[in-house]
Image: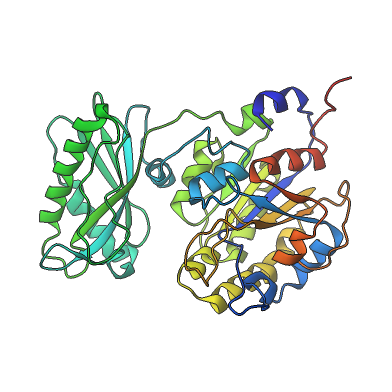
Amino acid sequence: MPHKYLQPLLNERTSKIVLLVLDGLGGLPVEPGGPTELEAAHTPHLDRLAAEGSLGQTIPIRPGITPGSGPAHLALFGYDPLAYAVGRGALSALGVGMDFAPGDVAARGNFCTLDQNGLITDRRAGRIPTDEAAPLVEKLRAIRVPGVRVEVAPVKEYRFAVVMRGEGLSPHLADTDPQATGKPPLPVTATQPEAEETARLFNQWIAAARKALADQPRANGVTLRGFATDPGMPKYREVYGLRAACVAVYPMYKGVSRLVGMDVVPFEGESPADEFAAAARIWDEYDFIFIHIKKTDSMGEDGNFQGKVKVIESVDAALPALLERKPDVLMVTGDHATPARLRSHSWHPVPFLLWAPASHLPDAQTAFGERACARGGLGTFLAQEAMSLALAHALRLKKYGA
């Protein structure tokens, strides 16, 4: 529901809402008639919640449209992803705490491996570890481009973020990753005339970066994608009346959370148990807690069906610690599907579980999986409607009209 219609209905309550997102949760069977990753996983706790609660499936953007992680999360947060187009660069920069003001242009960077002919042989530089990438980021930080200021920060593994600051910059730029090996990185090109000068400046920086990395065995090139500026989005406290927090490992998801006004919770560790412990630690300070699990998506992109199953099972095994906090509303879903069979994001509907003991209407389903969700009582709905469902089940919405 558009925020301008929702805001007048907000009702002050002390109820607690948790949004648990298993990135790329949706899947497909490997064999005809076989189970999806979620259906194959042993998930007694999620199945109990499914039996007690209500199931459905979400459409992240629109039917048939494969979403990126940024717009898919914005949809789950209740923002129309078609109205708020946010490039991944903004999310990456905000995710690692970089200064990022209106007028700046940010991009997400990947280290890549180039052969002697300048062709990409590995788009992710062998997934070099973060500690190996950090000194390379220092090399990039030393690059100067006349007329602008460029800042670079490590993100995770082979990823980094770059922010260009200066007068008259435009984010209307095309990505330089050709999305394939055996091809050279693309030049930065303007998608609108006013971005021509910004494209020239970024190409100048990329040329210097390639010289600085020329002696590296793996990470001897860079690609940039998701050019963006700050869109000035309305914040969670303003649109929902919620004190909101984010518990996430990967910087990009911290970035999209900061973009909508969530506080990012610092913690040690990367396991679901570590994330649930972090949520418990700040439980009394917030009305809404977003918890993000990344590795379901990573395993799907790697084509690792069993690996994705195990990640789902690890979330289920740790879930009792979260349930001990007795949330009033718990939503468990994914931002999009990443079937191991396809090794990529896909357009398929995403499983959705709503558990709200005081207010939900249980349906006839007894297990959490794609087929059960397709038959669930919530039906199929746009992901951006999840927040109005959460607020309603948390008894935070007044009636509409007389």
Q: Is residue 374 above or below residue 171?
A: below
Q: Is residue 162 left or right of residue 383?
A: left
Q: Is residue 191 above or below residue 209?
A: above
Residue 243 image-quadrant placement:
top right
Q: Is residue 325 left or right of residue 167?
A: right
Q: Nearer the viewer, residue 128 or 3?
A: 3
Residue 314, image x and y in percent?
Answer: 63, 72
Q: Is residue 218 left or right of residue 108?
A: left
Q: Is residue 220 left or right of residue 169?
A: left
Q: Nearer the viewer, residue 263 or 212?
A: 212
Residue 345, image x and y in percent?
Answer: 50, 59
Query: Where does the C terminus fall, quadrant-wise?
Result: top right
Quick one: which residue is furthest to the top in this view? 402
Residue 251, image x and y in percent?
Answer: 44, 51
Tell me, yes or no, if residue 369 can be seen here: no
Query: Where does the N terminus fall, quadrant-wise?
Result: top right
Q: Image point 29% across, 36% down: which residue?
A: 191
Q: Image point 62% across, 27% down: which residue?
A: 238
Q: Is residue 238 above or below residue 280?
A: above
Tell me, yes or no, if residue 137 can be seen here: yes
Residue 188 image-quadrant placement:
top left
Residue 136 image-quadrant placement:
bottom left
